[in-house]
Image: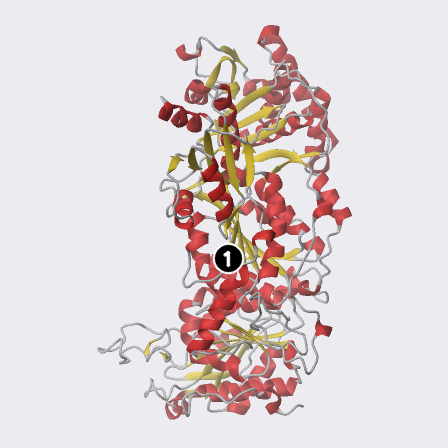
Amino acid sequence: MRAKEFYHRQSPTWCKGCGLFGIFDALKRAAAALEIEPEDMVIVTGIGCHGRLNNYFQAYGFHGLHGRAMPVAAGIKLVNPRLHVVAVSGDGDAYSIGLSHFVHTLRKNVGLTYLVSDNRVYALTQGQISPTTDFGHVTPSTPLGSKDFPIDGPTLALAAGGTFIARGFSGEVAPLAALIERGMRHDGFALIDVLSPCVTHNKVNSYDWFRDHIVHVEDIPGYSPKDKVKAWEALNIPGKIAVGLIYEEDKPSYEELVLPDREKPVAGLDLAPDRLRLRKILDTFR
Amino acid sequence: MINDLAVMIAGRAGDGVLFTGNLLARLLKRHGWEVVTSRDFPSNIRGEATCYTIRASLDGIYGLSDQVDILLAFDCEAILAHLPEIAPNGIVFCDGQGLVSPPEQARDKTFHRLYLRALARERFGREIFKNVIALGALSYVLDLDLSFLDGIISEMFLKRKGDEVVQKNIEAARFGYDKAREITAEAEKHPLTRKADKDRILISGDEAIGLGALAAGCRFFAAYPICPATEIWQWLVYHLPSFGGAVVQTEDELAALNMTLGASFAGARAMTATSGPGASLMMEAFSLAGMAEIPAVIAHVQRMGPATGMPTKSQQEDVLQWIFGSHGEFPRIVLAPGTVGECFDLTVAAFNLAEKYQCPVIVLTELDMGQNFRTARAFDLSAVRVERGKLLRPDELTATSDFKRYELTADGVSPRALPSYRYGVHLAESVEHDEKGYRDEDPENRRRMMEKRMRKLDQAAPDLFPSRKWGSEKAEVGFIGFGSTLGAVLEAMERLRREGLPSRFLQLRTLWPFPAAEVRQFLADNPETYVVEHNYSGQLATLIKSQISPCAELKSIRIYSTLPFTPREIVEPVLRSRR
């Protein structure tokens, strides 16, 4: 195992106490545990406070557009499956503007690890509601309380055919790192939704609040992440939020299904024109 | 003998109009003729009126004519709809069960009943043979070599359906040939002059773009289905995997272009194709390609807008969108092929330009070019080069290289490394960034980075396709246009020449960066210049005026109806203005 400092490029400037510190630390630990070379890792981010992660983490990075981390990450993974591609989004990025990309990339089972830093608000734009904000939550954009009912990423993922669905908590870095490591080993799409408090714009869903509301699935008697019914039940415990590896199944990854040869990355092909073969194709138009 | 001909096959969607037309086009091509097809289809699968026109000539042609010499109609309505287009000595074959006698307007035309469906049913047990019977009949009228039709039938069916089906179809073709001989007088025939079919192909613009992409080393294609660009994908999907590549259907066009950029960032030559609303969705990631300096090729086959518009009709309404569109300012290249050969050549060039200048490149065509078939000299594969610009090899970087992905260079283009290179680790950044790719909001950095990106194309002119000049050096009238209007313009110029009015045409093949020097010179050389374009507002004229100052007076010929330009639509306004 490597030292996690190996992946530390720069110290973050997030607000003191931001949940993203826990995610940053856990991701470094997971990369260290897997002994990934920085050049074999690509971190794709969306727009939000999490998007700064690329500046801090030592690896290749792609900081794209709001909500579009998924297709960019999928494009990278498909042309070079040898790379460890980790996408990072916030709850707005993943479950609002990028919801369709999230569901479809997950459904295709592209071999990505997707960390969604869920703080239940739009922090970078000063605290408006997000798709995971509680009903009635008062924010600058909802002075009378949110009238939107929230959605839950892991529950959506289970319904959409996810093959690795987990939830971690920024306040529990070691188990989060273990989930990320496991997700990165998974051959297929791995969602790790992370309860990640915003200390500046969300005074309700604090570290203590999350600690009071989480249930570790491994503490549920007889729990098995291979059992979809149990996963559904865990995601629907009234007033509680299930964390841990919620669901896992084996299904062929998209790379396995669509690439002619996973061992010959599309990005590494010799592109010199094969005139003989092209001539034969051209002849079909005669 | 006949040297120029237009045949129309008309009926309802589901009649096999497309099948019959495609085979006839290939048959004429095999007889040495130049061919341009045109489909006028509704955007549904079955039921509504459709027609397929084949313009054929012994000489080079690029577009449709105004008249139809032979109409083969699968129903009476088709006859009535198209009678005005039939030439005075034209010949009509009608499978109409409903018409008792030829319609009044058809009196000066040769009118024959050819009960294709009934004959197919009686003789071959299935109505589906009507199309091959029709082809046999047309072969008689045009005095074609039946063995050529046999050959095409065999190519079409042998692999997929077996010898029995081939033999039955060949029999049906002969049956149609004999039937036509029974009902057609010798004098009514349109016997074609024959010529050797040497080193030529018949191909659609979409297929030519697909083939160009394949030859250029495109190995990743991501797209969302949309008419009329889908044929590029449906062609590539059969070829990319055997070249080690992959084709992905995305959830929308936002994803299609973002995925293309991801693949390109990781080192693949990647492409997407779209039209209409899909292009609007791509505007967002178009800007990302510009800012993060990621090579990307986008083929846009224009259809009629706005909104959903008319998905099966051609138009040139999306020119300014690609030149001035999206948020922020960034360099982009917009190429506009006017022939299928140029669809191939410009697509190959697009991939090289995208990597050399690390920016998005648009190959802008229209439905008329994309979905219709045209003959061309077989593409020159020996000219295809794959040039990857400043893409470094992994061994060109060492521990002391201090690699800067967005290094400030004299030409604005920075070296590029790919994920997996040990000493090339960097960030592709959509936020304003420093030379290493990391976020930087310093005003001086912003100025430098903006100038770096924008100067990339300052010296690009020698790499771009020059405009093509057609017609007389000394002319009284000049035309400027681009894309598939080429055919109608050239034919209009020929008619004007016969009227004693010499003219010339500047066919723009690079729309952006704008070829200002060429256009300025062209304008200076003509007493008057018409801009010919298929849109309402005159987007090309607007572009010219915005880029050339002071600009000579520009006259404008625009159509925005559902069919491509015909020569008459260009000739008439020119002659009218001189009366």
Mark 1 nearby-residue class (10 Å; few <14, some 14–19, many ≥20): many
Q: Residue at x 69, y 76 (%)?
A: B397
In what element is the residue under mark 1? loop
Name the quadrant containing residue B303.
top left
Q: Residue at x 60, y 91 (%)?
A: A5
Name the quadrant containing residue A131.
bottom left
Q: Amino acid at mark 1?
A: Arg
Seen in the picture, residue A285 relative to B348 is either above or below; the reply is above
- Of B528 and B112, the residue lying toward us: B528
Name the quadrant containing residue A175.
bottom right
Chain at numbered mark 1: B
- Horizontal side of residue A76 vs A209, given as left or right: right
- Of B125 and B108, the residue lying toward us: B108
- Horizontal side of residue A132 vs B135, given as left or right: left
Outermost right residue: A276
Placement of the C terminus of chain B among the 4 image quadrants: top left
Instruction: State how the image is colored.
Output: secondary structure
Q: Is residue A106 visible?
A: no
Outermost left residue: A144
- Of B514 and B34, the residue lying toward us: B514
Residue holding disc 1: B332
Residue A133 in percent (x, y) is at: 34, 78
Residue B28 in percent (x, y) is at: 64, 25
Seen in the picture, residue B375 relative to A259 is either above or below; the reply is above
